[in-house]
């Protein structure tokens, strides 16, 4: 996977991600709102902002927020939506997660949601997040995660790649804890969740070609009982995806 492939995949789909019900709501966004409320954060960074829902959630609660993403089309859609919502303190900036164009200790808070599984080098991006955070400041990661069982891990990576070739990896909670610690963070106990993904909207959001969509359905039809049970596979291809939220403090 390359950065150009990720941009190619997401730029034509910017509006879909801004409007996506899956991305615009969820317990993790409620957790994010509760975490940020009352803390008086000045500058915040929505790292890999996608449809901008982290930024939209925290804009009323912080001094300023930068929505940062690789896709210029995505950033344009986010900026338009922020203006429509009256978030004058939300600005956009384009670039890679692994090379942030910000000075050391620039932010009081960094959050990333449903983005890191597309990054080419998550450890490098976490080191950058650590660099731009002020000492003792928090990072919150919200993302799809790989199941602990290897069989289920392989299954989810396969269907993710078939749906979207820019997918790199859904990391396990154990992998996240290790990467955060190695980058200089002290992670707290993660909160594990599941989200229900309706197959048709999941496929249409990425405009997955019929050939790949049919391959996903074929894999699901042949899945073992362990896989079927873990992902709560449904007859129409809808399924349950593992997710987690992790808060980590810059040491």
Image: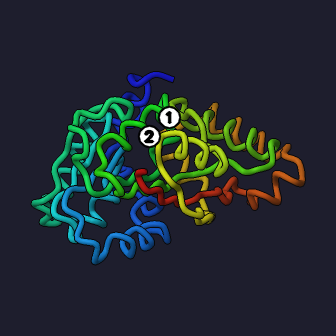
Pinpoint residue 5: horizontal percent, then vertical percent: 43, 24
Name the residue nearer the viewer: 55 or 156. 55
Pinpoint residue 165: horizontal percent, then vertical percent: 54, 30
Question: Which residue: 38% across, 28% down?
Answer: 8
Question: Which residue: 42% across, 30% down?
Answer: 6
Which element type, helix, strand or loop, lies under badge 1? helix
The image quadrant of residue 130 is top left
Q: Mark 1 sits on what residue?
A: 123
Question: How far is disc 2 from disc 1 in space, using C-alphas?
Answer: 5 Å
What is the number of the mark on residue 240?
none
Mark 2 crowdedness (10 Å alpha carbons): few <14, some 14-19, many ≥20: many
Q: Are circles 2 and 1 on residues that touch, CB within 8 Å?
A: yes
Name the residue nearer the viewer: 80 or 66. 66
Q: Is residue 169 above or below residue 200?
A: above
Q: Is residue 135 above or below residue 167?
A: below
For the rendered model, the colour scheme is: rainbow
Number of numbered discs: 2
Name the residue nearer the viewer: 193 or 187. 187
Mark 1 crowdedness (10 Å alpha carbons): few <14, some 14-19, many ≥20: some
Q: Mark 2 sits on what residue?
A: 126
Which element type, helix, strand or loop, lies under badge 2? helix
Question: Which residue: 38% across, 51% down?
Answer: 17
Q: Is residue 185 left or right of residue 218?
A: left
Question: Which residue: 58% across, 47% down?
Answer: 176
Pinpoint residue 95: horizontal percent, then vertical percent: 28, 32
Pinpoint residue 28: horizontal percent, then vertical percent: 48, 67
């Amino acid at each position: 996977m390359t950065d150009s492939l990720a941009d190619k995949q997401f730029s034509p789909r910017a509006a879909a991600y801004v409007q996506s019900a899956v991305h615009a709501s969820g317990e993790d966004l409620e957790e994010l709102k509760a975490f940020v409320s009352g803390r008086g954060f000045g500058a915040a960074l929505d790292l890999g902002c996608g449809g901008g829902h982290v930024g939209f959630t925290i804009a009323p609660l912080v001094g300023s927020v930068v929505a940062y993403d690789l896709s210029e089309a995505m950033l344009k859609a986010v900026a338009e939506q922020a203006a429509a919502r009256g978030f004058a303190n939300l600005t956009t900036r384009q670039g890679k997660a692994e090379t942030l164009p910000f000075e050391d200790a620039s932010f009081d808070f960094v959050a990333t949601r449903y983005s890191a599984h597309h990054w080419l080098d998550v450890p490098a991006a976490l080191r950058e997040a650590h660099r731009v955070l002020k000492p003792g400041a928090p990072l919150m990661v919200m993302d799809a995660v790989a199941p602990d069982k290897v069989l289920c891990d392989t299954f989810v990576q396969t269907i993710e790649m078939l749906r979207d070739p820019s997918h790199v990896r859904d990391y396990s909670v154990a992998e996240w804890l290790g990467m955060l610690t190695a980058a200089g963070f002290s992670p707290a106990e993660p909160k594990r969740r599941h989200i229900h993904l309706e197959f048709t909207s999941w496929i249409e959001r990425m405009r997955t070609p019929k050939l790949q969509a049919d391959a996903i359905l074929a894999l699901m039809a042949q899945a073992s009982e362990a896989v079927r049970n873990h992902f709560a596979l449904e007859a129409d291809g809808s399924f349950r995806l593992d997710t987690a939220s992790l808060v980590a403090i810059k040491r």
